[in-house]
Image (cartoon, rainbow, N blue to C red):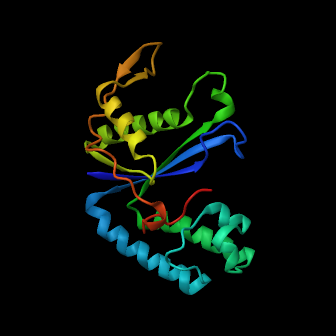
Amino acid sequence: MHYAYFDESGDSGYNNSPTDTFTLGCVLLHDSEWLNALDQSISFRRFLRDKFGIPPRLELKATSLIHNKGDIRKLGISFPARMAAYKSAMRFQRKIGVFKVFSVVVVKSRILKKEGTDVREVAWRYAIQRLERFGTSVKDNIHVVPDDGHGEFIKKKIRQMRRFNRVPSAYGDSTLERHATNIVEDPSDRNSERIILHTIGRS
């Protein structure tokens, strides 16, 4: 089975929103690699502590490293050092070789014309479709682990798409049934700041 860890970026509102995008980032990890990934992630966070002075339990965010925001700013790390830490995190994800990563980005201004459109619904619909296709391709089930606070919404969406999910065909105007039956159980909410595998986040 694969675990699908999700984190949200941006906000799903329209009024007074600071950004025009809402993003879901996903890290997929097979259960057989979980302990290996945990051990290597802990070692990497210790490396960041020893090399750059970044505490192991501080959640890394790309925007914080690039723009010197949040808790990173309090550490007084130079721009070159922050970029080196950022690049190290990117290399780590590739080097460890057990993570599969994808994201869903919704540009809110492009769907605003559809009155009543729920940005989160759009993002999660595409994310679940992506998970269903991935699970089918590797012949495995998936358990969703989203960020804290939206579990009930995501649970309803997954339950709905297990029974009804039609996607556009790559050929012509027809649609295909792609029930998300390989997404097992209900999602398990987690606080992303407490997930050790959350090595580097979004904004």
Q: Which residue occupies the foreground of this view, 15 or 133?
A: 15
Q: Residue furthest bottom?
A: 50
Q: Quadrant of residue 161?
A: top left
Residue at the image position 39 percent from the left and 34 percent from the top: 157
- Give the percent coordinates (x, y) of residue 84: 64, 74
Q: Is residue 16 left or right of residue 32?
A: right
Query: On screen, 169 above or below 62?
Result: above
Q: Residue furthest top?
A: 173
Q: Which residue occupies the foreground of this view, 122 or 172?
A: 122
Residue at the image position 71 percent from the left and 80 percent from the top: 76
Residue at the image position 54 percent from the left and 73 percent from the top: 58
Tag count: 0
- Give the percent coordinates (x, y) of residue 164: 33, 24
Q: Quadrant of residue 165?
A: top left
Query: On screen, 178 above or below 45?
Result: above
Residue at the image position 67 percent from the left and 70 percent from the top: 83
Q: Quadrant of the C terminus?
A: bottom right
- Give the percent coordinates (x, y) of residue 48: 55, 79
